[in-house]
Image (cartoon, grey):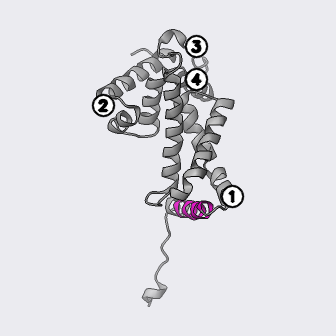
């Protein structure tokens, strides 16, 4: 007969274990441990880079620069992190904010919100190779006007609600919905779909 001490073991979900590891590394890094922060970087650089590249439509050196900027900001802000939310969530939000600041700075420069500034995007090859379609989709998203791209990525990829997007981008909820609709239409057109 099993006693309470000998009952079947319970397993902590993987996500909780990752969150616990992130929390421990973040606490060490907040106290100045650069090795712990380096571990955080290795764990999260891919995701941070991915969201930044999708949001700003930049790849290569610019996306790398913005990724580094996000991690520098994280290092600087880490001592003030209160551990009230998951560290990964906080870091991801910081990366999104870094990308949005880049988009805002572009707004003060030349406007790229018209379709004439967009490059041509190829369509999937006749064999329908998935890799070609994925590359085409990524390139098509990168050619979207900045606000439409930001709304599409935040809503469809990151799972934000229109109210969150509107607040972060300084637009009305209806404008967020309109930008999402516009982005989807432009993507269909660029990928050669008919509706």
- The answer to whether the residue labelled 1 contacts the one labelled 4, judged by CB atoms less than 8 Å apart, is no
Label 2's element? helix
- Is residue 58 depicted above or below 91 in this figure? above
Sequence-first disc among 1 and 3: 1
Look at discs 3 and 2 and give the one toward the viewer: 2
Q: Is residue 165 visible?
A: yes
- Tell me, for residue 139, which label it has, or none: 4
Q: Is residue 195 left or right of residue 139?
A: left
- The answer to whether the residue labelled 1 contacts the one labelled 3, judged by CB atoms less than 8 Å apart, is no
Look at discs 4 and 2 and give the one toward the viewer: 2
Q: Which stretch appears magenta?
A: 19-30
Q: Which residue is mark 1?
A: 34
Q: Residues within 10 Å of mark 1 (few under 14, many from 20)?
A: some
- Tell me, for residue 119, which label it has, or none: 3
Q: Residues within 10 Å of mark 2 (few under 14, many from 20)?
A: some
CA–CA distance in space, label 2 to label 1: 41 Å
Residue found 43% across the figure and 87% down from its top: 4
Task: Specify the quadrant that holds the C terminus.
Answer: top left
Sequence-first disc among 1 and 4: 1
Q: Is 63 covered by the magenta stretch?
A: no
Q: Which residue is mark 2?
A: 173
Label 3's element? loop
Q: Residues within 10 Å of mark 3 (few under 14, many from 20)?
A: few
Look at discs 1 and 4 and give the one toward the viewer: 1
- Is residue 110 depicted above or below 35 in this figure? above
- Is residue 23 depicted above or below 187 in this figure? below
CA–CA distance in space, label 4 to label 3: 9 Å
Residue 174 pos. (x, y %)? 29, 27
- The answer to whether the residue labelled 4 contacts the one labelled 3, judged by CB atoms less than 8 Å apart, is no
């Amino acid at each position: 007969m099993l006693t309470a001490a000998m009952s079947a073991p319970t397993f902590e979900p993987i996500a909780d274990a990752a969150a616990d590891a992130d929390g421990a590394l973040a606490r060490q890094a907040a106290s100045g441990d650069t090795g712990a922060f380096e571990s955080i970087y290795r764990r999260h650089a891919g995701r941070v880079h991915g969201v930044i590249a999708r949001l700003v439509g930049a790849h290569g050196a610019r996306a790398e620069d913005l990724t580094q900027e996000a991690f520098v900001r994280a290092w600087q802000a880490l001592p003030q992190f209160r551990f009230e939310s998951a560290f990964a969530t906080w870091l991801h939000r910081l990366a999104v904010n870094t990308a949005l600041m880049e988009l805002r700075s572009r707004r003060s420069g030349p406007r790229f919100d018209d379709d004439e500034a967009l490059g041509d995007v190829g369509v999937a090859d006749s064999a329908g190779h998935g890799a070609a379609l994925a590359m085409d989709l990524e390139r098509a998203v990168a050619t979207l006007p900045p606000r439409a791209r930001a709304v599409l990525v935040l809503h469809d990829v990151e799972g934000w609600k229109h109210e969150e997007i509107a607040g972060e981008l300084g637009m009305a909820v209806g404008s967020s919905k309109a930008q999402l609709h516009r982005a989807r239409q432009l993507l269909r057109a660029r990928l050669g779909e008919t509706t």
